[in-house]
Amino acid sequence: MGEAVKRRIAWVVLLGGLAGCCTGEEQKRVIDLASLEEIRIDYSHVGWGSSEEHFTITPSANAGKFVLRGRYETGRGRVVEVDQQVASDKIDSFVGHLESEAWTRAKGVHVLAQRLDRRALWGSVPEIHFSRSRCSPEELRLLARRHLGRSAIVSLVDTHYAHRISWMDDYPMAVVQVRWRGKPKFVMSSRSQKALMLPWDAGEPSDTPLEDEENWSVPVSLSLQAMLPPASQAFQRLDGISQMEYTMLSIDVMQMANKQCDALRKP
């Protein structure tokens, strides 16, 4: 076999290997953070009282390092000042998810449904008695367990996220700004009460956000959370579904079971 043929085969093998390693979910973006000037995260909440948190992430004096500075208020009202390093891989992860294609609602809801803790959901299912129900609370719980399959879970989560504001005395707002040297400023925001503050909207907060500019990316929320102090309210808001939300979801589950009961016991 001639040398030219050998080299051609070697290139085919090499290129085939590169294509195979960099397809689908395995593809890695190369993120250059050298021109990143600042990530600013502002969070506020109005409800039973009010609070504000402000954080900035900027390059440190040491090349390749970043510093988080800001302040937040604990549940007991103590103000905490923050001045600490942030691992560059956390910055890299957040920026990478921001630069990825925005997630659709369907994709976000599907992934959220997969993250739902079914044990926590069952633990929150209340003993509800529907005045006109043909089934007892125990029978409703049994029907709920039997019919709560994958598609029902997705439908449950989709209904839960139908409205950004679903209960009173809880009005959060987060605004994230990313500044690059020589590039336009990137801004995203959310007023969602729901877990992970999904969806994110392009630009500053608006009373009428555009659906086609929503981003339902779970990784964006989680990588943003990873850069914040765990004791901050913003961190906690970006966490998974809360116990209160599980209780609300469980009520929806019982209502679903009641419909199943009606279908089974029609006169």
Image (cartoon, helix red, strand yellow):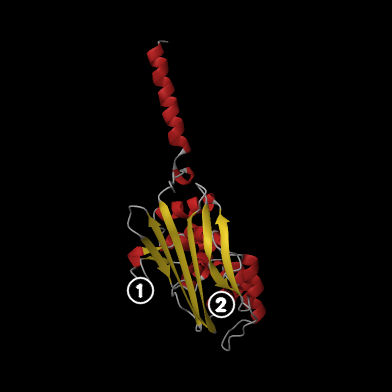
Residue 92: image location, x then y, percent: 48, 50
Query: Which residue lies at the image location 58% right of the left edge and 89% below the top edge?
Result: 131
Residue 197 on image: x %, y %: 48, 68
Specify the quadrant of the image occupied by residue 180. Answer: bottom left
Q: Is residue 200 left or right of residue 132?
A: left
Residue drawn at the location 62% of the way across and 70% of the way down: 121
Judge whether 84 appears above or below 80 on screen.
Answer: above
Q: Amino acid at mark 1?
A: Ser
Q: Is residue 225 visible?
A: yes
Residue linked to disc 2: 248
Q: Secondary structure at mark 2?
A: helix
Which residue does the numbered mark 1 point to in the structure image?
A: 206
**x, y percentage for residue 185?**
35, 60
Q: Amino acid at mark 2?
A: Met
- Give whichever of 133, 205 is nearer the camera: 205
Is residue 267 something that shows in the picture?
no
* N-terminal-most mark, 1 or 2: 1
Local secondary structure at mark 1: loop
